[in-house]
Amino acid sequence: MTLKEIRGELKKIYKERTRWDGGKGPFTPSLVKYRELTLAKQRVLYQLEEAIELGDKGEIRFNEILYESLTESQKNIVSMIR
């Protein structure tokens, strides 16, 4: 991923998080897991951005794989919710 792509993904996450209803529940376990994964993806994108700036290829690849895994997990949860 490039820094531009990372920042685009972060923008999507920020936009999604502004739509969250805060403490208005009840929340299903699937929705809780989806939100947890969203926050994890945000953190991984920050780490990926830092690794790119430092030029650490091993850390870049690790975070890319982790991000792909989190994204796949979210897709599975979405398919279960629908």
Image (cartoon, grey):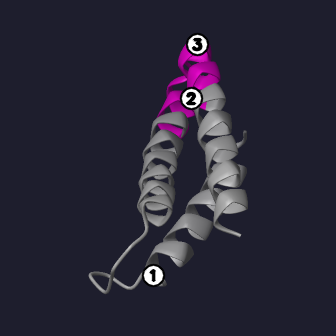
Q: Which mark is residue 8?
A: none
Q: Position of residue 60 (x, y in %)?
A: 60, 24
Q: Is residue 25 magenta?
A: no
The one nearer the camera, 47 or 82, is: 82
7 above or below 52?
below
Main secondary-structure element of the magenta-colored stretch: helix
Q: Are marks 2 and 3 in contact (CB under 8 Å)?
A: no
Q: CA distance from mark 1 to mark 2?
A: 25 Å
Pointer 2 residue: 63
What amino acid type is highlighted by mark number 3?
Gly
Which residue lies most toward the top here? 58
Residue 21 as seen in the image, left or right of residue 70: left
Q: CA distance from mark 3 to mark 1?
A: 33 Å
The stretch in magenta equals: 49-63
Pointer 1 residue: 18
Q: What residue is drawn where x is 34% and y is 79%?
A: 26
